[in-house]
Image: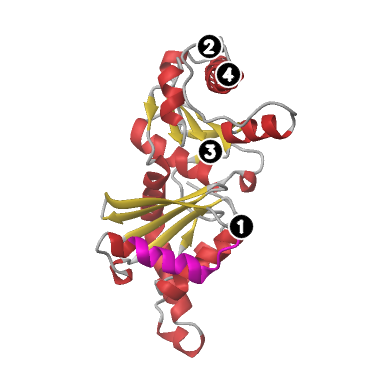
Amino acid sequence: MLLAFDIGNTNIVIGLFQEDTLASHWRITSDRQKTYDEYGLLLDQLFQSCGLKRSDVDDVIISSVVPNLTDVFRTMCERYFQTAPLVVGNGLKTGMSIRYDNPKEIGADRIVNAVAAIEQYGAPLIILDFGTATTFCVVNDKKEYLGGAIAPGIGISLNALVEKTAQLPKVEMTVPDKVIGKTTVSAIQSGLLYGYCGLVDGMVHRIATELGYAEQDITVVATGGLAEVIHAHSETIHQVDQMLTLKGLLTIYKRNEKLHRGFCVMKLLSGNRRKTCSKKLRKNSRCMVLRRAFVV
């Protein structure tokens, strides 16, 4: 089975694939203070709740936007699953051309989402991810990743509003009955929900205009915590796919499986035992290490 981690600033989404089927998935809090042992023991508990064992895992892939947690999970995988994880980053085959000034700046989750969306929905595309930040990723009709936009997430906006004002309360993010709020709580809820719907619809319109596409010709896919809520009140979102990032991790793993396995064998056969490793594996492993950018 393939164990997949999507490590975000607020949450970590975990998926376990049996071949192409997502057999189990969990969501836990991102905690930069936890050690690899604490995460390993937590995974043991999650596995036991589903009747699974560590030995069921054959390989691991990680997408992370939190560098120190990347190292924690890398160590945890080596200690608890006896495997070196495939970490999404420079050097992996994505099957997608990237037309970004500096591809190294792109968050791994944005690349993974774009790969999954192309595979699932075709192109052109706009991919929205409602996470700690709200991100827009744009893919043209040639399946090229062009870039996008990043805005503060709804949670960040609410926290900033509360912290920077003297009398506005922190409210639960629920859908208000009307756009015109009759209380402070409903006014804040309206501003957040309908304001973000306006942000989404306005950005989709501007992106389509800049690309020279009709809006109806671009598929808009949303994922992330509040995707369903925004979708219900947006005029431009066509699909909500909460498993988009996990699907993208599976796709990227498949496209890099042979190189990764070669790299793992090289690592195991280091030192004097390296001579027993085939030339093909050594060649593939060098390619894995030396390539510097996301490639087709």
Q: Does the magenta stretch include residue 15?
A: no
Query: Residue tagged by mark 4?
Result: 195
The reply to whether discs 1 and 2 touch (Cβ–Cβ < 8 Å) is no
Disc 4 marks a residue whose amino acid type is: Gly
Disc 2 marks a residue whose amino acid type is: Val
Query: Residue tagged by mark 1?
Result: 67
User: How many callouts does the rendering have?
Assistant: 4
Question: Is 212 drawn above or below residue 262 in the view shown?
Answer: above
Nearer-N-terminus badge (1/2): 1
| Mark 3 residue crowding within 10 angstroms, few (<14) / some (14–19) / many (20+) | many
- Comparing labels 1 and 3, the label whose residue is closer to the camera: 3
Disc 3 marks a residue whose amino acid type is: Gly
Secondary structure type for disc 1:
helix
Nearer-N-terminus badge (4/1): 1
Q: How is the image coloured?
A: secondary structure
Q: Where is residue 81 in the image (x, y as percent from the top left)?
A: 39, 71
Can see residue 84? no
**Which of the two residues, 94 or 40, is positioned nearer the viewer here?**
40
Residue 131's disc number: 3
Dominant SS in magenta:
helix
Q: Which residue range is magenta in the image?
A: 33-46
Q: Is residue 39 magenta?
A: yes
Q: In which quarter of the image is residue 244?
A: top left
Query: Residue tagged by mark 2?
Result: 179
Of the 4 image quadrants, the one containing the N terminus is bottom left
- Disc 3 versus disc 2: distance between alpha carbons? 24 Å
Can see residue 225? yes
